[in-house]
Image (spheres, helix red, strand yellow):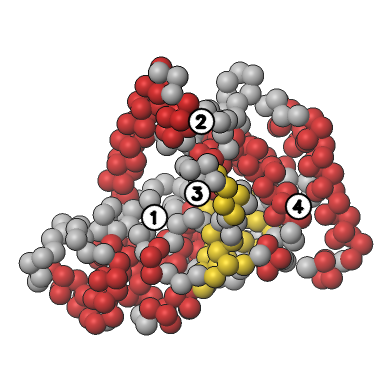
Amino acid sequence: MGVQISEIIPRKEIEISDLKGKIVAIDAFNTLYQFLTTIRQPDGTPLMNKQGKITSHLSGLFYRNINLLQGGIKPVYVFDGKSPELKQEEIERRKEAKRIAEQKYKEAKLNEDIDGMKKYGGRFVKITEEIIKESKKLLIAMGIPVIQSPGEGEAEAATLARAKKAWAAVSQDYDALLYGSPYLIRNLTSARRRRTAAGIYIDIKLELIEFQDVLNKLQIDKDQLICLAILVGTDYNPGGIKGLGQKRALEIVQKYKYPVEIFKHVQNNDRYNFIFDWQEIFKQFHEYESSYMEDIEFKKVDETKVKEILLSNDFSENRIDSGLQKLKQIEEEKKQKGLGDFF
């Protein structure tokens, strides 16, 4: 779900070329969900090998990352560790939503309802340990760094950017801003076009959100931004405070300025009611520090390993070779121009 502040966040459209030479820390789970829900057959069925094992994630990781690397972007994937206890309610909510979606998908399949299958097919996706393991193996074989976060991947990606080990965090959610990422990029790993429910194709643009620009436009500081997010709802307090929308929440944090005063006002207002511990949630965003101390290292592509992984999952050898050729061309260009000139 992520934090619900999309209506009031300023952003600008950018091109892939604007990110050339930049290291970007990608929220791996967010991206894998994206691949698993969107890379599917017309009836909503995910891509699978001959044994019936899902391969949508491998397809997304291989082909989309080739596009990023061709654009001179240096992707780093950050994987989730253990979820905080505070997130348990949201995890349970998601499980229930997936259970309902899976039931509706089965009903649609039984009735040969293709539209229904497509509608619900991507809504009960589960990222299994096998999917995580396969994803890491393929990324490492492609020479793309993999970082294992002790906690939330998005928090780790944001703090890597804050520490200047990466230029930006990449995610579809806005939580990275609460952890202080100087830049947040949306839609980087998305398909460039998407088909709407009405059957119309629309272009998907890259979005850049600048942390300081957000604070300036909203006329608040980081602590107020975190409070704003808590008021409207985060993964640690799903739904936020009932009846309090994004614009009204912004007015409150602007007026009362300090976290204690903000929540004192809300608690003293009979219109609002909440039972969550705002201070614990505030600490979750405010005090997170990255545990990753090493320099991020990019390695050469292990073509043999890439082919082994993809061929064992019934990918077309011709398409694999075509992708590897593109990666080889990237390496050749680096050698010819020198890293400094290339980037």
Which mark sits nearer the N-terminus, 4 or 3? 3
Label placed on residue 243: none
Residue marked by disc 3: 30
Residue marked by disc 4: 299
| Residue plotted at (45% across, 57% down) | 173
Which mark sits nearer the N-terminus, 3 or 1? 1
The quadrant in which residue 138 appears is top right
- Distance from disc 4 to disc 3, alpha carbons, whole Å, reads 24 Å
Q: Position of residue 6 (x, y in %)?
A: 40, 63
Residue marked by disc 2: 44
Above or below 8: residue 121 = above
| Residue plotted at (46% across, 47% down) | 81
- Distance from disc 2 to disc 4, alpha carbons, whole Å, reads 36 Å
Above or below 196: residue 11 = below
| Foreground disc of the pair 1, 4 | 1
SS of the residue under disc 4? loop
Q: Position of residue 69 (x, y in %)?
A: 73, 55
